[in-house]
Image (cartoon, rainbow, N blue to C red):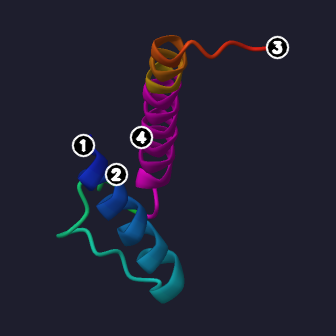
C-alpha cells in the first residue's frame, strides 16, 4: 500500500469504529467478509510504513552526520 492508501485506510477504519458503518467503497484495505477484518491489514501496513520511514530518516541522519563530521561522543 502507498502511504496515501495507508492513511486513507486508517481513516476509514476509524470511521467504521466510530459510526458502526464501514466505508468499504473508499477503503483500499477492505476485505471480504467485512466486519473489521481489514483491521489487521491496515495495522500491518501502518507499522510497515512507520518502520520504512524511521529507517529512511536514520539513513538521512547518518548521512548528514558523516558529511558534517559529527560523531557520537
Pointer 2 residue: 6
Pointer 4 residue: 45
The verdict on residue 47 being magenta is: yes
In percent of the image, x 44 and y 25: which residue is there? 60
Pointer 1 residue: 2
Do the residues bearing badges 4 and 2 touch, measured as CB atoms within 8 Å? yes
Do the residues bearing badges 1 and 2 touch, measured as CB atoms within 8 Å? yes
Q: What element carries label 3?
A: loop
Label 3 crowd bin: few (<14), some (14–19), many (20+), radius 10 Å: few
Do the residues bearing badges 4 and 3 touch, measured as CB atoms within 8 Å? no
Give x and y (percent) for residue 23.
28, 75
- In-image side of 65 versus 38 (left or right): right
Residue toward you, 24 or 46: 46
Q: Distance between the residues labelled 1 and 2?
A: 6 Å
Residue toward you, 67 or 59: 67
Q: Distance between the residues labelled 4 and 3?
A: 36 Å
Q: What stretch is highlighted in magenta?
A: 35-58
Q: Is the magenta stretch mostly helix, strand or loop?
A: helix
Q: How far apart are marks 4 and 2 (CA)?
A: 6 Å
Q: In which quarter of the image is residue 69?
A: top right
Amino acid at each position: 500500500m502507498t502511504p496515501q492508501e495507508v492513511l486513507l485506510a486508517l481513516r476509514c477504519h476509524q470511521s467504521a469504529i466510530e459510526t458502526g458503518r464501514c466505508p468499504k467503497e473508499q477503503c483500499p484495505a477492505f476485505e471480504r467478509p467485512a466486519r473489521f477484518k481489514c483491521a489487521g491489514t491496515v495495522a500491518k501496513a501502518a507499522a510497515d510504513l512507520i518502520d520504512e520511514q524511521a529507517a529512511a530518516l536514520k539513513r538521512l541522519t547518518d548521512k548528514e552526520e558523516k558529511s558534517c563530521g559529527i560523531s557520537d561522543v
